[in-house]
Amino acid sequence: MIAMALMQLGCERTRVPHSAGTHNAGVRAIPSANAPSDAGVDAAQVPDVHTVIAAADSAADAATEADSALPREIAGATGATSFLSIDERVILRRLCTGEVTRLQRNTGGSTISFRVWFADGGRGLFKPQQSNSVANFRAEIAAYRMSRALQLHRTPPSCGRTLPRAMLQQTADRSGDQAFSERVMREIIGRGDEVPGAMIYWVPGGLENVPGSERYPDLLDTARPLADTDRTLAENLSTLLLFDFLNDNIDRWSGGNILRQRTTLQNPTPMMLFMDNGAAFTIGRDNLGARPTEQAARLARVTRVSRSFVARLRALTTESLGRELRSDPLGSPVGDNGLAAILTRRDRALAHIDATAQSRGESLVYAFE
């Protein structure tokens, strides 16, 4: 019964909020060769992150020419795109089909996940199917595919694939944590000897909270002035709130869920990333999700929007979004009912934007290109 329930992403559920700063531990920095080795991992064998990125960038040109030879589910329904300036086809080829050479327990958070090392030196995070309802691996895949459909490219690439149950259990047993080993044995749900899950791109360079994000009610209120220095942040938050309304992500504001790569001299203004989407894509009554009142109240605060993003929302169709969702190797992560719920919430968001533009004026509401 549990397995069948988890197969239906549309089931209504609630989520226990994560404590701040722990649940995104699975997408932290790649350890350097000089870092202390974790249990079961020889850190000296882990390539430097810049070497990995350089190799991926070099492979991107070849991937463009070889795109027609890639399976459609790896190439993606909408063709060549990039994430953090890396061709997504290079990333997806690794996530979907790359040889896994090492696994390690991922610490932090309340769900079971594993850090992954690939033969080409790349990194990933595997979130397996499990009985914990807050760990919906399909939601992570759906968020990535919807980000592609809306031409956002802010959600880390994710691919549905299976790993052997024995590999996961052996990794848990080697962790030295008996309680974790027993959890893996008890909570992971598979199909015979294989366990499906989401293989997610490991964002390099470390992550940090986006400063000022808690000010979104003021930044997005047309009744308040918007400083030029806040325009980029306000536009990003506006798009994130609309994205989350469509997804019914009920966990964004529980703490530590609005992230970007760490600021460096080489990257002084890293873009906001739309990560941690495991508590999203419920259906709920009238297709309005698990917490419709809370989500509607947050949507009402969005009175400054991006004109181009709203145009892409309007252009989204059952066919275009469904085609993108079905591009994952495990098939659509939401199903027909989930797809209908997304578009119902899209229509609610557009109705709010149109009514606000009529009452306050388009020039104020469409504040961003």
Image (cartoon, grey):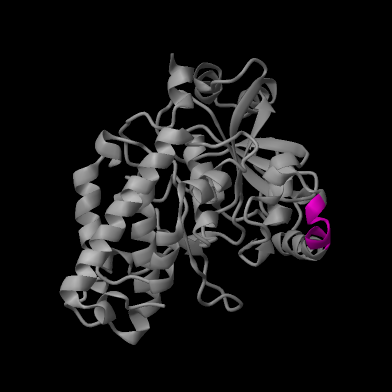
Res 60 visible: yes
| Residue in the picture at 83% in, 61% down | 65
Residue 51 position in % (x across, y down): 77, 62
Residue 174, above or below 87 = above
Res 135 visible: no
Query: Residue 97 sits in which quadrant?
Result: top right
| Residue in the picture at 20% in, 72% down | 358
Residue 257 position in % (x across, y down): 40, 53
| Residue in the picture at 68% in, 60% down | 80
Query: Residue 307 sits in which quadrant?
Result: bottom left
Question: Left or right: 241 with respect to 152?
Answer: left
Q: Quadrant of the C terminus?
A: bottom left
| Residue in the picture at 72% in, 64% down | 50
Q: Quadrant of the N terminus?
A: top left
Residue 21, above or below 168 = below
Residue 152, above or below 129 = below
Question: Left or right: 144 with respect to 91?
Answer: left
**Residue 242 on the magenta span:** no
The residue furthest bottom is 228
Number of callouts: 0
Give the residues in magenta: 62-68
Residue 203 position in % (x across, y down): 59, 56
Could you say which is closer to the camera, residue 184 or residue 247? Answer: 247
Residue 284 position in % (x across, y down): 29, 35
